[in-house]
Amino acid sequence: MSSAVLNNTLIMNTVSSIYESEESLDNRSLYEMVASKLGVSLSDFQAPVGKSQTVRNLMTRKIRWAQQTLKIKGLLEQKSRGVWELLKTNKKDEYLHATIDGKMIIALSTDLGVSICADSRTVFASGVIDEPIHLTLTSSPYPIQKPRAYGGESDMNAWLDMMMKTLEPIVERLAKGGSIVINLSNDVFLKGLPARSLYLEYFTIACWEKLGLYLMERGVWNSNKYPSPTQWACVKRYHAKSSYEPVLWFCNDPLACPADNRRILEEHSESHRQFVESGGMKYEYQHGDGAYRKRVGEFSKLGSGRIPNNSFYIPNNCLSGREVNQYAKALGLPVHSAKMPESLANRFVRHLTEEGQVVLDHYSGTGTTPEACELTGRRWFAIERVWEYVRQSFRRFDIHNIDYWVNPAFLAAQNEF
């Protein structure tokens, strides 16, 4: 049992973030989600307490303490016996300052890129970005029933309309062979039903019919995300828990795309190395009615690496993300509840672009994509309309000792939006 995860602040922040992103929760579901998010098992926290040495669960006690604290502060309301939800009047978006339409301010710049606090449509209407974009990599708001603090649309048609209007000017600036990669959610359900929305399918078709984008790949990002969908997997047991998020890759000219999987080769397994060193295939083999043949001596030369799968595991938190959280708390800023891990951004930046090419993230959040670009030598533009998220993104550059310039006007602009 790790005592570190029983830290009051850590438990409180975890409980708060779960209530912020989920519908009404019963206590059992809350316990399971907290444990999953912290990467621990509830059973590991059984211990004798008090004079009587009665066995209690120390983790669930801490979670109930956090829950009671939120109740006392008037941040939770009871929906039914044992079921609570975050009061809508206390959502964190009340403490976020987003730029109004038409307003734009440069926040930060490095030798490789620029961070802009604005709505992306304002930026593209201004003509500030006047060079071809080779990759747009982002995680957009999902069309979930209860949008996150950073915004979004819950209605699928409204969400599709928002996405098309946002992407249209970006597609116009794409280089020949340019790509758009968007991380979306597999956990969007029809209201009140254990049936998934078809928004991914409609979005994919709209990208082809309205934007002329080819679907190159449906990537499967497996992570250590907490159990979901809560209502249909944890409360009412219809579904197995969802373990992945789709990452859709589109391109305007597939044969001109600079993608190269040799830039993201993985290390060979030890068993494969031993197989190659032993001389590879020792006999001829065929299967699938002769469609697949293996000849003597094949696999006797070790290549430069293993081609990665389109289904991959990357944890949904990372060192730089945790550093950003700590930095935000030190500044008294709301923590972004759905940051992309740097390894995910790094993978697509290296795969789909060459050094020196231009990468855009128009829902940049706390700046994961710019961080990946700085580490891989790509130029970048980051656009984010929430002042608090842009401000805490500065920490990513400090972590890697990257020189940057901060616009004093941005620092003074928080309350002007």
Image (tube, rainbow, N blue to C red):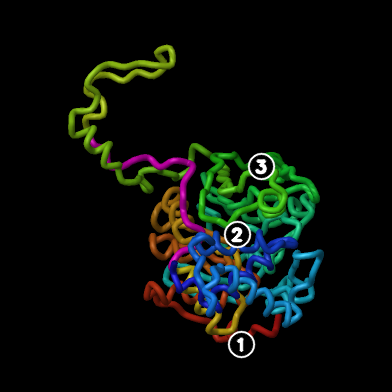
Could you say which is closer to the camera, residue 60 or residue 141? 60
Sequence-wise first label, 2 or 3: 2
Do the residues bearing badges 3 and 1 touch, measured as CB atoms within 8 Å? no
Could you say which is closer to the camera, residue 33 or residue 324? 33
Identified by mark 3, the residue type is Thr
Q: Nearer the viewer, mark 2 or mark 3?
A: 2
SS under mark 2: helix
Q: How far is disc 2 from disc 1 in space, using C-alphas?
A: 42 Å
- Residue that extends furthest to the front in the rendered view of this protein: 52
Give the percent coordinates (x, y) of residue 239: 66, 44
Q: Quadrant of residue 204?
A: top right
Sequence-wise first label, 2 or 1: 2
Residue placed under numbered mark 1 in the picture:
412
Left or right relative to 82: residue 265? left
Sequence-wise first label, 3 or 1: 3
Residue placed under numbered mark 3 in the picture:
204
Residue placed at 31% from the left, 17% from the top? 285
Could you say which is closer to the camera, residue 329 or residue 368? 329
- Magenta segment includes 311: yes
Residue placed at 71% from the left, 65% from the top? 151
Instruction: Find the magenta span and give its range.
Output: 302-319
Could you say which is closer to the camera, residue 60 or residue 252? 60
Q: Nearer the viewer, mark 2 or mark 1?
A: 2
Left or right relative to 67: residue 360? left
Can residue 210 be seen at all in this image of the molecule?
no
- Decide: few, some or many residues near mark 1? Use Cα within 10 Å; few <14, some 14-19, many ≥20: few
- Decide: few, some or many residues near mark 3? Use Cα within 10 Å; few <14, some 14-19, many ≥20: some
Identified by mark 2, the residue type is Glu
